[in-house]
Amino acid sequence: MTRRITVGVDGSPESSAAVAWAAREAVRRGYALRLLHAWTALPDIAASAPDAAAQAEWARTVAEEAGRVVASTHPGLSVSVDSPTGEAVSVLLGAAEDAEFLVLGSRGHGAVVGFLVGSVGQQVIAESARPVVLVRADDRAEREAAGREVVVGQEGEPEDSRAALEFAFTTAAARGATLRVVRAWTLPPLYAYSPASLRLLDDAGGMEPYEKKALGEALAPLRERYPDVPVVEHVEIGSAGQVLLAAAAAAQLVVVGRRARRSAVGSRIGSVAHALMHHAPCPVAVVPPA
């Protein structure tokens, strides 16, 4: 089956930036590109409201115009366009299942808009079976220049971040970029200490050496599989969100694992991913667990 990247398009500047980012990534990886505009027919409650046929034509035009732009900038790229009707979350989640990952446009520094309006974006990111990449309207190809790192967060046991690390290594390899792997740590509360945990810390020589050892163990199999990817192991005391945001300041992409949970008001995303989505200056990839 053809490997492809799917992009949600809606004609906005954020959407255009997402399409441009996804097209460059598809060329680097040798994937196809699918441009998708999901739409729902508006009720005919006023004489001036467009009929369903007119709405369908507008949706098709949005997707096809994005396709024409990609064809003019990347003539050798395989591009398909689609404008299915249906509830946005369901359409996007279904499209993600057939893609390597899904790309959406988002607004920078504040509330996330476009496809990420209210609960729609939360559900897509929290429930997608594939990674979701968020791209700002002001994103430019220059940010992917040599010297800018791909940054990824690692936490817990090796399996806890396996999917995010895999995505980050694959991306860094495709871009010829250095990968900075960040593991943030904080002093545990006093009641969390136990004879077993204290013994582990003593064996490692203290908290920071213990964290460095844990990071090295998580990276070992991926370093072996991607020997050409330069890796910087970054262990720092502090909250994971703050440490990752600082590392992302000069990055070309930041990758974070998803820790979604359900609540009375619907799906919610972990605090670290939430912070990066709203404040990282570069594209953000949110990767579901393996």
Image: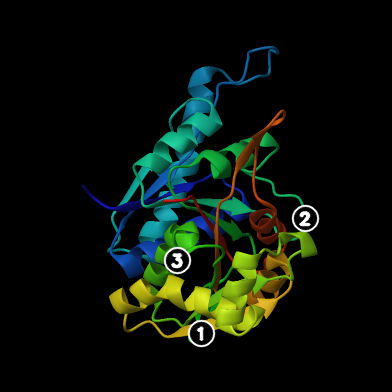
Compare residues 208 and 235 and report the one nearer the observer. Answer: 208
Identify the residue shown where x is 77% and y is 59%. Answer: 191
Of helix, strand and loop, which one carries label 1? Answer: strand
Residue 39 visible in the picture: no
Q: Earlier in the sequence, mark 1 or mark 2?
A: 2
Residue 192 visible in the picture: yes
Evaluate if marks 3 and 1 touch, with contact meaning CB atoms under 8 Å apart: no
The image quadrant of residue 156 is: bottom right
Of helix, strand and loop, which one carries label 2? Answer: loop
The colour style of the image is: rainbow
Residue denoted by label 2 = 110
Residue denoted by label 1 = 232
Residue 116 image offset from top left, x and y in percent: 64, 43
| In-image side of 71 versus 52 (left or right) | left
| Residue 54 versus residue 128 in the image, above or below | above
Of helix, strand and loop, which one carries label 3? Answer: helix
Identify the residue shown where x is 41% and y is 39%. Answer: 95
Query: Label 2 amino acid?
Result: Gly
Mark 3 and mark 2: Cα distance apart in space: 27 Å
Identify the residue shown where x is 63% and y is 60%. Answer: 137
Compare residues 237 and 172 and report the one nearer the observer. Answer: 237
The number of discs equals 3
> In the drawing, what numbered circle is on residue 165?
3
The image quadrant of residue 97 is: top left
Mark 1 and mark 2: Cα distance apart in space: 30 Å
Evaluate if marks 3 and 2 touch, with contact meaning CB atoms under 8 Å apart: no
Residue 213 image offset from top left, x and y in percent: 51, 79
